[in-house]
Image: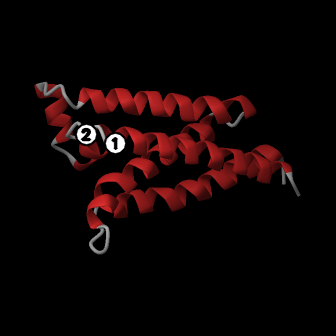
Amino acid sequence: MHKSTKLQLLTSVSLLIVTPLGILSKFYYGPAQVWVNDYSGDILYEIFWCLFFFLLIPTRKAITQIPLWVFAVTCVLEILQLWKSPFLEAIRATFIGRTLLGTTFVWWDFPHYAVGSLLGWLWLLQIWRSALCC
């Protein structure tokens, strides 16, 4: 199998794993429910965007740049949660809007974004290495 095809396949399969986990984390009930509902999604959110952009830009250089950009943008989005404009509030009133933009500024989200970006970087690196071998 060609390297670019293998990269696309591995990234797509990864997205098919991470996406439902991220959505389901918002509906989880059980042990550590608060952490799973509020923070595991932050980690999965970062990984999702790393994988999504890697699907579009599958280069060696992108493996490092994508997680850095994803972290920076999600930090800006977190800060934007302090701004309650009617336009943003209308978007946040929908499930997709709440999922993409968030609703409430929480300092504790930043470390989870960092962990998610780090795991996203490691995931992209593993995809790259897997595509090169065999």
Residue 23 position in % (x across, y down): 36, 58
| Residue occupying image coordinates x 47% and y 33% | 71
Residue found farthest to the bottom: 30
Query: Mark 2 to mark 1: distance in Å?
Result: 6 Å
Instruction: Residue 68: name its quadrant.
Output: top right
Residue in view at x 31 percent, y 73 percent: 31
Instruction: Please state if 124 lies on the left or on the right of 87 as rendered.
Output: right
Q: Which residue is mark 1?
A: 109
* Amino acid at the residue labelled 1: Asp
Could you tell me the amino acid type at mark 2?
Answer: Val
Q: What element does badge 2 sit on?
A: loop
Q: Decide which of 107, 57 is in the foreground and name it.
A: 107
Direction from residue 53 to residue 113 in the image, left or right:
left
Q: Determine crowd level at label 2: few under 14, some 14-19, many 20+ residues with C-alpha closer than 10 A.
A: few
Callouts 2 and 1 close, C-beta under 8 Å: yes
Q: Residue at point 49% right, 33% down?
A: 70
Q: Looking at the image, is 121 positioned above or below residue 35?
A: above
Residue at numbered disc 2: 106
Quadrant (top left, top right, bottom left, bottom right) of the C terminus: bottom right
Q: Is residue 27 left or right of residue 67?
A: left
Across and down, in percent, residue 6 comes to 76, 52
Q: Which mark is residue 123?
A: none
Apparent side of residue 64 relative to residue 37 in the rendered image (left or right): right
Q: Position of residue 65 (x, y in %)?
A: 61, 28
Q: Helix, strand, or loop for circle 1?
A: helix
Q: Position of residue 93 (x, y in %)?
A: 15, 42
